[in-house]
Image (tube, rainbow, N blue to C red):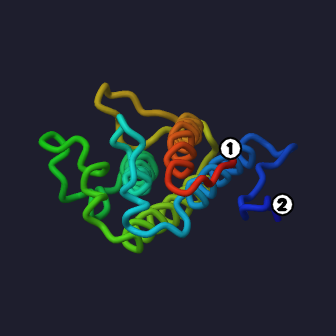
Amino acid sequence: MPTVDEQSRPEPPLDGDETTTLLGFLDFHRATLAWKCAGLDAAGLRATVPPSSLTLGGLLKHLAYVEDHWFSHVLSGHDRSAPFDAVDWTATPDWDWESAADDPPEALHELWEEAVARSRELLERALADGDLSQRARRPRRDGSRPSLRWILVHMVEEYSRHNGHADLIRESIDGSTGE
C-alpha cells in the first residue's frame, strides 16, 4: 500500500522496480491534477491566466483524451471512446480544450475519472500479457509503434507539464499553492 501525502496523493515508491516506479509516478501526477481541480465550480474550471487560454476544465478534458488516445487507441488498438470518437480532429484540433467550457464540472471530472479507470484496466491487461518493451498495437502517423515503456514515460511527462499549468491557474483562482 503506497504512502499518501497530505493531499491524498500516492507517493511513488523509492525502491520499486521499473514498472512500479513508472506507474507510481503516473498515479501521483494524476492525483495532483485531481487535487488542483477539486472543489471548483464551473467558473473556476473556466478561469484562465492571460494571455493563455488554458483552463482547468480544458486540462481535465484534454487529459481524458490523452488517456484514451494512448492507452485505449494506441496501446490496445481500440476505437476511440465517446465523446472523442465523434470529433473531427482535423477540423477542430483543439476541440478538447475549447469544448470544455460548455461542460458542467461534474461531467468533466467524470469524463477524466472514467478515462483513467479504463487506462488502469488496459494497463493491467497489457502487463499481464507482457512487459514494458511490448509494442503498441496501433502505429503512430509515421508508422512507428512505441513501447509501453515509452507510453508510460510520455504520460508522466504529459501530466507533469500540465500540472505546472494547473498550479498557476489554481493559484490565480483562489491563491491555493503547492507542488
At which x and y percent is residue 33? 56, 54
| Contact (Cβ within 8 Å) of mark 2 with mark 1 | no
Residue found at the very far left of the displayed protein:
91
Going by the image, does 139 lie left or right of 150?
left
- Which is closer to the viewer, label 2 or label 1? 2
Image coordinates of residue 173 in percent, x first then y, are: 50, 54
Asked if 71 appears above or below 152 in the picture, the reply is: below
Residue farthest bottom in this picture: 106
Q: Examine the image and state in which quarter residue 78 appears.
A: bottom left
> Residue 149: x, y in percent?
59, 37
Q: Secondary structure at mark 2?
A: loop
**SS for callout 1:** helix
Q: Which residue is mark 1?
A: 22
What residue is rendered at 79% in x and 43% in y?
Answer: 17
- Residue 134 in sight from this viewpoint: no
Residue 4 or residue 101, whichever sits in front: 101
Does 43 sit above or below residue 30? below
Name the kind of residue labelled 1 in the image. Leu
Up-down: is 82 above or below 97? Answer: below
Residue 111 vertical position relative to residue 10 in the rendered view, above or below: below
Q: Earlier in the sequence, mark 2 or mark 1?
A: 2
Q: Residue at x 23, y 58 (%)?
A: 85
Dot 1 surroundings within 10 Å: few (below 14), some, or many (20 or more)? some
Q: Position of residue 115 (x, y in %)?
A: 44, 62
Quadrant of the drawing holding the N terminus? bottom right
For disc 2, the marked residue is: 3
Which residue is at the far right? 15
| Separation of marks 2 and 1 at Cα, in angstroms | 16 Å
Q: Toward which corner of the image does residue 86 lie, by quadrant?
A: bottom left
